[in-house]
Image (spheres, helix red, strand yellow):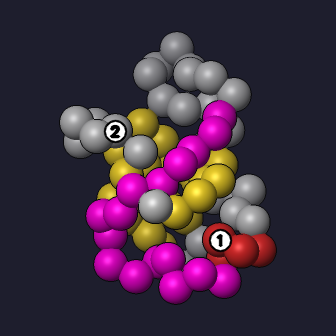
């Protein structure tokens, strides 16, 4: 996955597939390590994301950023 945009207040990361298709956003579930990294520099950057599957609309269900690559 690729983080295409980050907003602060509240902290939100928009996710895209490698092909550039919007597939959801992460607003909760950032670990302390992820929040403390200077990760939210300049998008786009790759991440490892886990989720509870896909919605009927083709978006990730409850995505969480697990790792920044």
Q: Residue 12, percent across and down? A: 55, 64
Query: Residue under circle 1?
Result: 34
Sequence-first disc among 1 and 2 = 2
Q: Residue at x 71, y 74 (%)?
A: 33
Where is 60 relative to 55, above or below? below
Residue neighbourhood size for the residue with mark 2, other residues' Cα within 10 Å, grouped as few (<14), some (14–19), many (≥20): some
Real-space CA distance between mark 1 and mark 2, rounded to the nearest whole angstrom: 20 Å
Numbered disc 2: secondary structure = loop
Q: Quadrant of residue 42?
A: bottom left
Residue 17, label in figure: 2
Q: Residue at x 44, y 22 (%)?
A: 58
Q: Residue at x 34, y 38 (%)?
A: 17
Span highlighted in magenta in the image: 36-51
Where is 53 relative to 1, above or below? above
Q: Answer with left or right where residue 27 lies relative to residue 32.
A: left
Where is 29 relative to 50, above or below? below
| Residue 9 appears in the figure | no
* Residue at the top extreme, as displayed: 56
Q: Residue 51, percent across and down? A: 65, 35
* Residue at the left extreme, as displayed: 19
């Amino acid at each position: 996955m690729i983080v295409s945009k980050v907003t602060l207040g509240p902290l939100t990361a928009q996710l895209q597939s490698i092909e550039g298709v919007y597939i959801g956003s992460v607003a909760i579930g950032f670990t302390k390590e992820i929040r403390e990294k200077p990760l939210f520099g300049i998008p786009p950057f790759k991440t490892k994301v886990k989720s509870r599957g896909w919605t009927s609309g083709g978006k990730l269900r409850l995505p969480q950023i697990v790792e920044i690559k």
